[in-house]
Image (cartoon, rainbow, N blue to C red):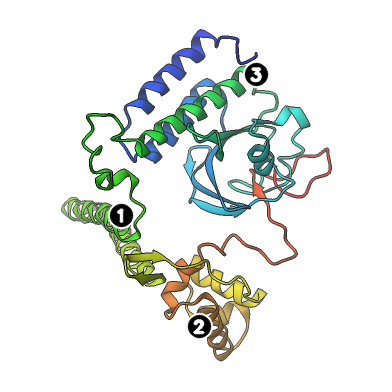
Amino acid sequence: MTAAQPFTDRVVSHLRLADHRLRTSEPGSSRRRYSICRMTMHNITQVDSFYVGFFHGDDMLVIPYIFDHDRSLQPDITKFSRRGPSYWVRSSGKPYVYSEDDGGLLSRTILFGNEDEITLDAVIVPLKEPDTGEVVGLMSIQSLTAGVYDDEVVAATAWLGEALMLAQARDQHVGTSGDSLYTAHPELNSARSSNPEERFKLVSEQLEWARRRATELTHRAEQLRDEALVRESGELRMTLEQVQVDLAEWMLTLKTTGDGLEEISPPRADLTAREHEIAAMIASERLSNGQIAERLGISLKTVKTHVGNILSKLGVGQRSAIVFAMADLLAQRPEHDPGHDLGHGPAPAGPVSDTGS
């Protein structure tokens, strides 16, 4: 099937419904749009894994949405190498199709999801800015069954990626018509705001709403005398409260300027291997100094020395700020590791590969 060939009636019905849902989605509802794309492709073909990622800098991929089967995985930031599919899609502007190289490029990936499962078919399409055509991200579908993605599936995935980016672009172009509310005052268009202070307030409001809902659920569970539900809803509320605190502490990693707050320069990447390991434990697992000492089999004094060096190198004054100051470094690996793409399951037998699927 070429770009000029029509889709089958079944695929047309699914894509038309997706187009309607994307067009009518609320501004800023990115997760809903990603979910629309995932479910649309799931209705068209077999999709065992799905993710959407956006490029950041020369070799980083920010992945805000990722599913393994029906399980939502934590958003991630990963490095990709010049030998993998992310770089190829970004540089060529074309879809990567598993069948074209028997999964050769896809084999050079890192693992996610169930590592005992092997991806045997995949399509990765570029996500482009509608105005400029610049490749800014990618969307991937993967299957544990070989040969399920034909030309029509590839074309449908690519078309859906374009529809997604048009919907995303509408957030940035709200108010561009002649009679728009924002024509005279574009600075009032909240969809375009990148000010950290405003973003902080918006996210804080969303978290507070979620925390209140969790509190209501706890009260209802208490009335039902469901001890397990009381405990679980209480844990959810505590997690949301911790995220609120973490978000507030993230503000400590910003610097004050005459015009307000700006994000600090990227942290220095000259952490030693041990410092990077300890910083990752603090940022990812929130381990205490004592827990780190026990896990690594070193003295508490040594851990404290390492933490002091980490704070100095990251340019932050509090241990809690390591979580946010490490955001750009968590995906980095020791210098001997050139970086990887994102894949699912171990490398299939066949062509020479590094890791991933």
Q: Distance from label 2 to label 1 (Cα)?
A: 32 Å
Marks 1 and 3 close (CB-CB < 8 Å): no
Q: What residue type is labelled 3?
A: Asp
Rate crowding at label 1 as few (under 14), some (14 to 19) or many (20 or more) other CA atoms within 10 Å. few
Is label 2 or label 1 in front? 1
Q: Under tag 2, what secondary structure?
A: helix
N-terminal of the pair, mark 2 or mark 1, is 1
Q: Specify the label residue 290 is tagged with.
A: 2
What's the residue at 55%, 91% (across, down)? 301
Q: Under tag 1, what secondary structure?
A: helix
N-terminal of the pair, mark 2 or mark 3, is 3
Of residue 65 and residue 199, the one placed in the foreground of this image is 199
Q: In which quarter of the image is residue 240?
A: bottom left
Q: Where is residue 259 in the image (x, y as percent from the top left)?
A: 31, 65
Q: Distance from label 2 to label 3 (Cα)?
A: 56 Å
Where is mark 3, residue-wise? 151
